[in-house]
Amino acid sequence: MTRSHPCAQRTKTHNDNSCNMLESKNPAIDIDSLLERIHQEVARQKGRSVQTDGMDRPAPLAIGSVLHFGKKGNAAAYVRSGWGQPESEHQWTDGHEAELAFELPVTNNDLILSFAAEPLIGGKSETQHVQAEWNGVLVGEWSIHKSGTYATIVWSRHLQASPMVLLRFILPDALSPVALGLSQDTRKLGLCFREFRLSPFSDTGA
């Protein structure tokens, strides 16, 4: 007997759509900047834009504040493409990529990026593999098989290029509840987001 996924039940009526090689005798070379350019070039070769100059100015996001997803939440001002309609207390990613955009205050601190979410799993689909790109730079990877809070560090060097951020979640395992026999929902769902937060790294006591 197939067990229904709790979030999928609530959405069944929806149809939304080596470093040594980089060493140099010239102290003027900034290795971090060089690596950053390499990361961006790799991202461009993958066909993903890492430019934020032409992006509509996003809403400001205070470091430490929490984004709550759902109809009563405050995440609506930050979601871009790749999301389903907000539901009571959550919002599903819809498709293989989902984006958040925001503008941060100037900071020299590393940040902790964390989010509370539940994956769509069932049948032979036991895990949602997820990557996060910060303006085209890979900052986190997770294999998510249960509801929980997941986190990664965003190093301060990634914050210097632009205060405007396009955060892209990549979800290669997104699939529809109807394909899993959970409901008639045909959207390609990955994660059911409840909260998102950026905190100073010092807050963790590390």
Image (cartoon, rainbow, N blue to C red):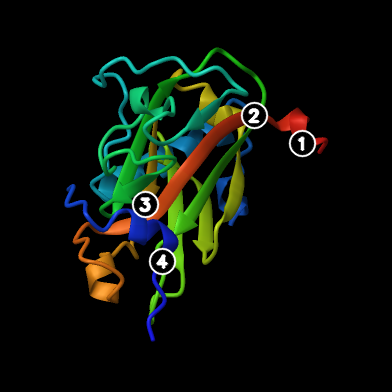
**Residue identifier under label 3:** 170
Secondary structure of residue under mark 1: helix
Image mark count: 4
Other-residue count near label 4 (Cα within 10 Å), few / some / many at <14 / 14–19 / ≥20: some
Q: Depth-wise, is mark 3 or mark 4 nearer the camera?
A: 4
Q: Is residue 202 above or below residue 180?
A: above
Q: Amino acid at mark 3?
A: Ile
Q: How far is the residue under mark 3 from the one under mark 4?
A: 22 Å
The residue located at (35%, 48%) in the rendering is 92
| x then y, percent, for residue 26 | 60, 32
Labels 2 and 3 touching (C-beta < 8 A): no
Is tag 2's residue or tag 3's residue first in the polypeptide sequence?
3
Residue 5 - label: 4
Is tag 4's residue or tag 1's residue first in the polypeptide sequence?
4
**Between 92 and 152, the one nearer to me in the picture:** 92
Other-residue count near label 3 (Cα within 10 Å), few / some / many at <14 / 14–19 / ≥20: many
Is tag 1's residue or tag 3's residue first in the polypeptide sequence?
3
* 149 sits left or right of 136 in the view: right
Labels 1 and 3 touching (C-beta < 8 A): no
Q: Amino acid at mark 1?
A: Thr
**Residue identifier under label 1:** 204
**Residue identifier under label 2:** 199
Q: How far is the residue under mark 2 from the one under mark 3?
A: 22 Å
* 121 sits left or right of 24 in the view: left
Secondary structure of residue under mark 3: strand
The residue located at (44%, 53%) in the rendering is 131
| x then y, percent, for residue 83 | 29, 42
Is tag 2's residue or tag 1's residue first in the polypeptide sequence?
2
Q: How far is the residue under mark 4 from the one under mark 2?
A: 31 Å
Labels 4 and 1 touching (C-beta < 8 A): no
Q: Amino acid at mark 2?
A: Ser
